[in-house]
Image: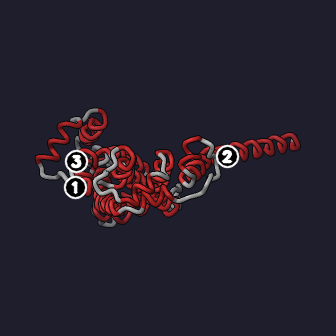
Amino acid sequence: MNVFSGKKIKAFDVFNGLFLTAAVLLCVLPFVHILAVSLSSSTAATKGVVTFWPVEFNLYAYDFVLGRIDFWRAMYVSLERILIAVPICMLLTVLVAYPLSKDHSILKSRSAYVWFFFFTTIFNGGLIPTYFIVKETGLMDSVWSLVLPGAVPVFNIIVLLNFFRQLPKEMDEAAVMDGAGHWTVLWKIYIPTSMPSLATLLLFVIVFHWNSWFDGMIYMNDPTHFPMQTYLRTVVTMPDLRNVTLEDLENLKNLSERTVKASQILVGALPVLITYPFLQRYFVKGMVIGSVKG
């Protein structure tokens, strides 16, 4: 019986290793292919002969995308957007999720408030009313038009709300018996013990604002105010030929739509790929295990 069980465990380990290896390859190989395309010649990329290694290696696509002042201006707008939006979104998420996580005995009409927020995830005013609100409030062509419409992420509130409700009530009750108020309970107990959830939501907010391009397209009349993703979309679909130099025209001969798009994808994904390892260590459970005795 022990020999049979040992063989089953070994077979499972082999299958598990093969499955995880296949999963890793499915995630990594597309990026390797995109990188190879971005570093290949326009002829090789157009013919589709590039697999996982560059053909006729060159950096023309990156020179075209990175070598323009418009790129760095768009990078500044995106960084400014993230630096403003992330603190606002996280603060509002915590301040809304905490009271909604309480029982009806503490917050009356709690269900009504929860349904009020949940209703917005099903129905919303639509694009045109939102546009007119942004326009009439004077937010057009400003970074606030990219931040304020999504300042209260309801999905994140629901996630954090459910996480708060799973925390042991004994910690809350013990702090209240010691004279702590809601602010103390929130910042000294709930926030430190909710770091895994907060780190996950932080990554959600960063990825959302970094990848957003449509709001920049409709709320920014001046192309110099475009965020990164909106700018990268216009590089190929709507190129601005008014300031094209002879050097740019020469570089366009060495480019193809595939190489430029591949370089855009890598440039657009790079900040998130760099940020993720710093937040990954928080993606663990059990931070409250042992915090309540007895």
Would you say the residues marked 2 and 1 are in contact, meaning their CB atoms lie under 8 Å apart? no
**Is 135 situated above or below 73?**
above
Residue 144: assigned label: 1
Report which residue position mark 3 lands on.
219
Residue located 39% across and 46% down the image: 236
> Viewer-nearest of labels 3 and 1?
3
Circle 1 Cα neighbour tier, 10 Å, few/some/many (<14 / 14–19 / ≥20): some
Which three-letter amino acid code belongs to the residue tagged 2? Answer: Leu
The 10 Å Cα crowd at callout 2, few under 14, some 14 to 19, many 20 or more, is few
Q: Is residue 235 above or below residue 129?
A: below
* Residue 33 against residue 174 in the figure, above or below: above
Question: Could you tell whether 214 is left or right of 248 in the image?
Answer: left
User: Is label 2 or label 1 in front?
Assistant: 1
> Residue drawn at (50%, 45%), measured in percent from left and top?
258
Q: Which residue is mark 2?
A: 20
First in residue order: circle 3 vs circle 2: 2
Instruction: Judge by depth and name the residue closer to the eye, 207 or 53.
Output: 53
Classify mark 3: helix, strand or loop: helix
Q: Nearer the viewer, residue 229 or 28?
A: 229
- Residue name at image x 30 percent, y 62 percent: 80
Residue 176 visible in the current orientation: no
Question: Looking at the image, which is closer to me, 170 or 57?
Answer: 57
Q: State which mark lies toward you, 3 or 2.
A: 3
x%, y% of residue 124? 24, 35
CA–CA distance between discs 2 and 1?
43 Å
Disc with the residue nearer the chain's start (3 vs 1): 1
Q: Earlier in the sequence, mark 2 or mark 1?
A: 2
Q: CA distance from mark 3 to mark 1?
A: 10 Å
Instruction: Work out which residue is located at the far left of the displayed protein and give it.
Output: 136
Say which amino acid is labelled 3: Tyr
